[in-house]
Amino acid sequence: MSDKVFITGSTGNIGSVITKNLAKENVSVTLYVRDVKKADKMFSEIEGNQNITYVEGDYTTLDKFEEGIKGHSRLFLLVHDLNNMPEIKGKFSEIAYNAGVKQIIDLSSFTVGQSRVGIISAAHTGGEERIRAVKPQSSSLVVLRPGYFMPNAFQNAREIKEHSILSSVSAPENKVNVISTEDIGDAASTILLDPIEKHGDIVYELTSQVMTNAEIAEAFTEALGRPIKYVQNDYNTAYERMVPFLGHKLAYDFLRIGTMSLDISTPYLTVLTKKPLRKYQDWIRENKNAFQ
C-alpha cells in the first residue's frame, strides 16, 4: 500500500490502536502530537515502528499541520475540544483536502442527529457539517459515530472503589450503547487499509454491546468479586457533583443524555473490526485494579 496516513489523537485510546495496526502493516504513518519525545517513547518498541514519523503541533499551529500534511492521502481526524470543534475540524479538513488528501475519517458521536440539543451533539454535528462544506466532490469523508466509550467508567472508579456503587441519573432499566475504544481503532484501521472508493462517504454507527445500567453493575460485581449496586441519582445531586470538573454545558448535557434509553446495536461491526467485538465484562476484568 503506497498511501501515507496522517493521524491526530495518536497517543489516545483510539489513535494508538490505529497507529499500531497500520505500522504493523508497513503503512507510512505521520503522528501529529504535542510532545514528540513522549509519543516516540510510546511507540518506539512496537512492530513496524520504522514506519512512524512525527509532526509536533496542536490545534492552534495550523502552519505546522499545513506543512506536515503534504504528501499524505488519508487523514484520521480526532478533536477533543468541544467548544471549538466545528472551527478546528473545518480548518484542518480544508487544509488537508487542499493539500491533496483523498480520504478523511472523522471521529464523531452517536449524538449527531439530536437536532443540536446539548453541547456534544452541537459540536459533533457542526464538525461534520464544516468538513462536508469543504470536501471536494472527488474526495471522501467517512464518519464514525461511536456510542459510550467503555473507559468512561473510570469516572465512576472512586464511588465503585469506596462505596461499591455505580451511579448516574439514568434509570436501572435504561439501555446504554457502549463501545470499546479498541473496536473503534480496529474499524478505523480497516477503513484506512481498504481502497478509498470502498467506503466512499459512509457514516458508520459503532456499538460493541448494549446493556442496561443494572447489567453493567452486575458486570462489575462479577469482575470485582463483590456486590456493586446501581444507584439512580437525582438530577441536582448529579449536576453538583459533575459541574466543578466538567463545567455547566457538559454537565447539563450528561443529565440530558442520561435520561435516554439508547439501543443502537451494531453486531455487524465485526465486518470492520475483523474480530469479535469486545465485551464490557472483559474490559472491566482487564482494568479491575482501577476499581478495587
Image (cartoon, rainbow, N blue to C red):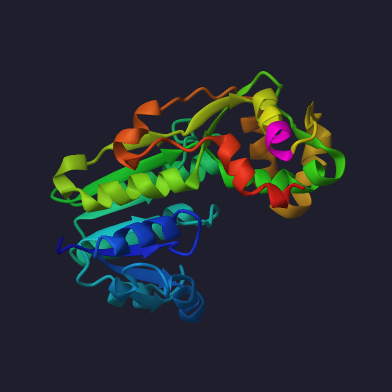
Q: Nearer the viewer, residue 98 or 11?
A: 11
Magenta portion: prevailing SS class: helix
Q: Nearer the viewer, residue 202 or 46?
A: 46
Give the quadrant of the N terminus.
bottom left
Can you name the residue that lies furthest to the top here? Answer: 173
Q: Is residue 222 magenta?
A: yes
Q: Quadrant of residue 120?
A: top right
Q: Which residues are magenta?
A: 220-224
Residue lying at 37% horizontally and 61% vertically, measured from the top left: 20
- Position in image of residue 228 (x %, y %): 78, 32
Residue lying at 66% horizontally and 43% vertically, measured from the top left: 153
Residue 223 showing in the rendered view: yes
**Residue 27 appears left or right of 179:** left
- Position in image of residue 34 (x %, y %): 49, 74
Q: Quadrant of residue 176?
A: top right
Q: Nearer the viewer, residue 85 or 9?
A: 9
**Residue 130 appears left or right of 160:** left
In the displayed structure, 114 sits above or below 65; it is above
Residue lying at 25% horizontally and 60% vertically, measured from the top left: 25
Can you name the residue that lies furthest to the front here? Answer: 225
| Total numbered labels placed on residues in the image | 0
Can you name the residue that lies furthest to the bottom here? Answer: 37
Q: Is residue 262 magenta?
A: no
- Position in image of residue 41 (x %, y %): 49, 76
In the displayed structure, 196 sits above or below 12; it is above
- Position in image of residue 33 (x %, y %): 45, 72
Residue 249 showing in the rendered view: no
Residue lying at 28% horizontally and 65% vertically, measured from the top left: 95
In the displayed structure, 252 sits above or below 86; it is above
